[in-house]
Image: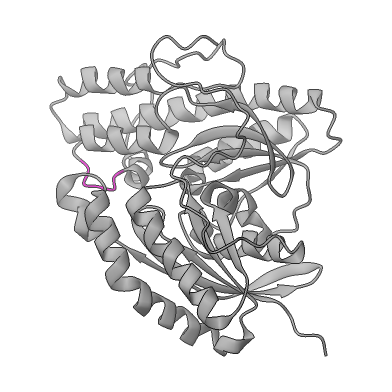
Amino acid sequence: MTKKTIILGIESSCDETAVAVIRDNGDKIPTILSNIVSSQFDIHKKFGGVVPELAARSHLEKIDLITNKALEESKIKLNEIDAVAATAGPGLIVCLTVGLNFGKAFALSLKKPFIAVNHLEGHALSPKLNSKLNYPYLLLLISGGHTQYLSVEGLGKYKRLGTTIDDALGEAYDKTAKLLGIDFPGGPKIEEFAKKGDFQKFKLPKPIIKKGGCNLSFAGLKTAILRIVKNIKTEQEKFDLAASFQKTIEEILYEKTKVAFQDFNKKKQNTNTFVVAGGVAANKGIRNKLIEVSEENNFKTIFPDINLCSDNAAMIAMVGLEKYRLKLFDNLDFQANPRWALDENAKFLKGAGVKL
């Protein structure tokens, strides 16, 4: 009986210490043998955001424990691991270095290949852990640090079609939550607030909705929220503003995704697969709106499982598995890259005065 490939994945790009073990199943979906994620919410809560030095210290303190727990839950022996994959960027440099160096040392001790992984590619391939997914496909990556439409043409082959020119979508959610007085991390709680509110109470702007192709902007929306919050006096008004914000985001993504479909079709990819990944892909309202626009434009929408939307190591192991199949290994002197882009040829589009 042929041995099935086993990959150990490590993720420490921000404030989650994560280790996972997955097993290849040939043409079938890989099996997640373990996927342990240790969050740092309690550490950063009082600061209202992630403090890099504290995050890195927590990674150092926990990574041994989390690795042992992942190995124990997977019920595999160390010598069964075929390769070690670790996030090398993008992310916070002090955090990336912890997981990356640990992964290198682990691979060296086992005398097994080491694979450096782009965190964003982990999100891009995360649906492969729960769905059959073939290249090429259109990807909407929506997370705390990134918001991009990309044409995914193969492993490591990305063409950016659109991006945010200011705040990432997850960042817009977190900042709005903070303005509404919701404790960090407040972004995921916005949708709960929205369910109790009336989205028609406040009219919010939709920046660059009719221009800029499928590029996006959320800074003006955040500024509008700031102005309105100053005059809010009741809890119900907070719910109403959250509902208006949620509805506005859904409408922005609906319109921009239609443009992305057109741009993707121009590339004559002969496929209608639309993947939505990243932490914000767990938002049910956004999911439903993107399914709606996909069905209207004859696209099939694929999402990762909810528990695979936020940062995790199973998605890092998934990229590691694909690279292992192609024998794409890295040297142990591979350096962390906090600004590692998926499309390294894409034009930088961020900041005041950007021309679209």
Where residue 53 sits in the image (x, y, percent)? 23, 53
Where residue 33 sits in the image (x, y, percent)? 58, 78
Q: Locate the C terminus and report the quarter of the image it occupies.
A: top right
Indicate left or right for 77 with 15 as reference: right
- Which quadrant of the structure image shows residue 148? top right
Q: Residue at x 47, y 12 (%)?
A: 354
Label total for image: 0
Q: Residue at x 36, y 21 (%)?
A: 219
- Which quadrant of the structure image shows residue 186? top left
Indicate left or right for 104 with 264 as reference: left
Queried whether the magenta region covers residue 271, the answer comes back as: no
- Residue 130 appears in the picture as rendered: no
Magenta stretch: give its range.
Answer: 182-186
- Residue in the foreground of this view, choosing between 66 and 192: 66
Q: Residue at x 46, y 51 (%)?
A: 336
Q: How is the image coloured?
A: one colour
- Residue in the foreground of this view, choosing between 207 and 26: 26
Where residue 3 sits in the image (x, y, percent)? 76, 85
Q: Locate the N terminus and report the quarter of the image it occupies.
A: bottom right
Q: Residue at x 50, y 30 (%)?
A: 250
Eyeballing the image, is 229 above or below 328? Answer: above
- Which quadrant of the structure image shows residue 76? bottom right
Where residue 327 sits in the image (x, y, percent)? 74, 64
Which secondary structure dominates the residues rendered in magenta?
loop
- Residue 51 appears in the picture as rendered: yes
Queried whether the magenta region covers residue 185, the answer comes back as: yes
- Residue in the foreground of this view, choosing between 275 and 5: 5
Indicate left or right for 86 with 54 as reference: right
Eyeballing the image, is 200 above or below 327? Answer: above
Query: In the image as oriented, which residue stretches furthest toward the front?
Result: 333
